[in-house]
Amino acid sequence: MGGQDRRGEDPPRRRAEGPHGSPPATIRHTYRGDLQIDLVAPDGSLYRLKSSSNGDSADDVVATYTVNASSQTANGTWRLQVYDRYSGDTGRIDSWGLQF
Ligand SMILES: [Ca+2]
């Protein structure tokens, strides 16, 4: 920005560009309906990407999710939080990422 400070304005901060962040995720699992997936923003805000659903017996989550993260600063630590809500089948996060 440069220029002069203007009283009463917040300092410029980097924000997520545009309204969307898109984390592509690959999670290997033998019963993906067990899984609840949230994106956790640097300030701790949760964005629900996927709810568990006990009727979804397919394997693996390979998906790209779009959330409205326009109120968040992009800088900081973003986490993918996955809960396996049912006993039995298990899995692991293979990869995930973020695009702004
Ligand atoms: Ca399970």
Image: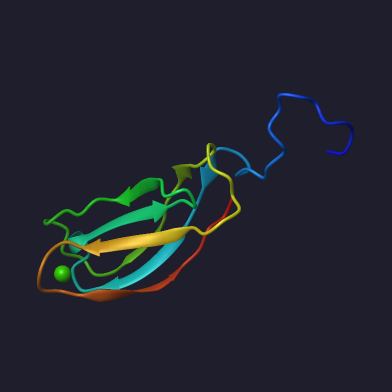
- Quadrant including the N terminus: top right
Q: Residue at the spot x=61%, y=53% of the render?
A: 75
- Nearer to me, 32 or 11: 11
Q: Position of residue 40 (x, y in %)?
A: 41, 53
Question: Looking at the picture, does residue 68 appear above or below residue 59?
Answer: above
Of the pair 76 and 30, the residue shown nearer to us? 76
Q: Give the x, y percent position of residue 57.
A: 15, 64
Q: Residue 51 placed where, x, y %?
A: 24, 51
Q: Quadrant of ligand 1?
A: bottom left
Tell me which residue sits at (49%, 58%) in the image.
78
Residue 4 versus residue 14 in the image, above or below: above
Is 36 situated above or below 27? above
* Image position of 48 with respect to 93: above or below: above
Q: Quadrant of residue 15?
A: top right
Q: Position of residue 80 (x, y in %)?
A: 40, 61
Colour pattern: rainbow
22 with respect to 59 (left or right): right
